[in-house]
């Protein structure tokens, strides 16, 4: 890496604490969730947010987009939502030069830098699947033509873990497309008190733009250049393979697991560990990066058997046992 390029990267990395500070002007608490959303952005992936109503999921995403001056769109998923409502449709218009009628593609809300798929489990699988190509290929195909999505591009989907009536759980194939599965918890007593004080008056914080679209693209490029030792890559490989009941050396997994994570989980864990290093102003991955991110990377890629569900064993409990057993 040349000196000038290194200086540029260091300047961008030094702004990341300022980005967290700007988001903190609006979002009180939820520091872990904010970090994981930013990690997903730096790693170039997408994330699924799960939490009960009222935990500021939408506000968190909108605030991050505002602090980055990125184009933001929110899609409210409902049972009658159609794929065309997401990707767009062709409309018939007059060509003023020829006088003929022509079909013109009208872009849908998916054409934004940050797309909030609100309550994604409330729409049928056909509409959920409309997002698969966008998430993986960063383009939309309509009428035989490809339309590139803007970069950077981040989909953040939310779902409510409590109310399951009239919902369509995401299939495993689509869950695996999400880089991170982030769970939001209730705020602490102190944080909730601060929320009550700061959100019920007339004051409205003004956000400053910290990084541009190109800055984020540069940081995503830097993330892939972060050093990770062969020993840590080997550790990630052993950790992911240990999630598979048939091959796992961990008795806990053999007892409670139905099936484990695929190779994409290892790729996600390497990239996210690198992104966490960048977020913490480091240029090398440490074991703590891997152990911290094992939960949001693996929790939606491990399936438990009926016995585990009956005993209220969670995937997070399995991951805890894995981290203790795999050295």
Image (cartoon, helix red, strand yellow):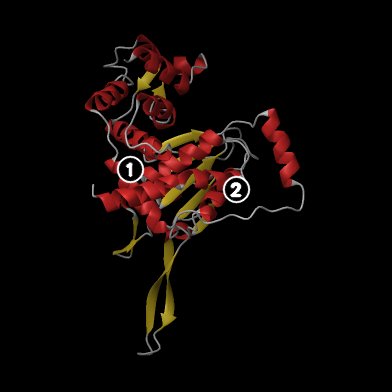
Q: Find numbered disc 2 in the image and state the secondary structure of the residue it sits on.
A: helix
Which residue lies most toward the top here? 251
> Visible in this render: residue 133?
no
Q: Quadrant of residue 55?
A: top right
Q: Residue at x 62, y 46 (%)?
A: 25
Rendered view: 98 above or below 85: below
Residue 223, disc: 1
Disc 1/disc 2 C-alpha distance (Å): 26 Å
163 or 282, nearer to the observer: 282
- Give the labeled residue for mark 2: 59
Q: Choose the circle earlier in sequence order: 1 or 2.
A: 2
Q: Residue at x 33, y 15 (%)?
A: 326
Q: Find numbered disc 1 in the image and state the secondary structure of the residue it sits on.
A: helix
Give the image location of residue 100, x and y in percent. Answer: 37, 86
Give the image location of residue 171, x and y in percent. Answer: 41, 37
> Visible in this render: residue 186?
yes
């Amino acid at each position: 890496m040349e000196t000038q390029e290194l200086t540029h990267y260091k300047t961008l990395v030094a702004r990341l604490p300022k980005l967290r500070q700007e988001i903190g002007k609006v979002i009180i608490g939820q520091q872990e969730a904010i970090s994981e959303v930013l990690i997903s952005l730096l790693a170039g992936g997408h994330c699924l947010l799960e939490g009960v109503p009222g935990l500021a999921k939408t506000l968190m995403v909108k605030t991050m987009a505002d602090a980055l001056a990125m184009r933001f769109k929110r899609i409210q998923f409902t049972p009658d939502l159609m794929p065309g409502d997401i990707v767009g449709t062709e409309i018939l218009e007059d060509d003023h030069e020829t006088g003929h009628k022509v079909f013109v593609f009208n872009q849908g809300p998916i054409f934004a830098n940050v797309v909030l798929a609100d309550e994604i489990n409330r729409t049928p699988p056909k509409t959920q699947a409309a997002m698969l190509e966008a998430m993986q290929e960063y383009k939309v195909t309509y009428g035989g033509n490809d339309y590139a999505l803007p970069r950077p591009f981040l989909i953040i989907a939310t779902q409510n873990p409590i109310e399951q009536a009239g919902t369509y759980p995401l299939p495993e194939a689509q869950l695996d497309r999400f880089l991170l599965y982030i769970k939001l918890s209730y705020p602490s007593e102190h944080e909730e008190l601060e929320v009550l004080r700061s959100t019920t008056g007339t004051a409205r914080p003004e956000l400053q733009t910290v990084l541009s679209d190109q800055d984020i693209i540069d940081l995503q490029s830097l993330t892939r250049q972060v050093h990770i030792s062969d020993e840590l890559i080997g550790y990630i490989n052993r950790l992911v393979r240990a999630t598979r009941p048939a091959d796992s050396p961990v008795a806990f997994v053999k007892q409670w697991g139905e099936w484990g994570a695929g190779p994409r989980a290892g790729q996600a864990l390497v990239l996210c560990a690198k992104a966490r290093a960048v977020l913490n102003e480091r240029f090398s991955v440490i074991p703590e990066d891997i152990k911290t991110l094992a939960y949001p990377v693996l929790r939606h890629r491990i399936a438990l058997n009926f016995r585990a569900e009956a005993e209220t064993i969670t995937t997070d409990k399995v991951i805890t046992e894995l981290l203790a057993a795999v050295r």
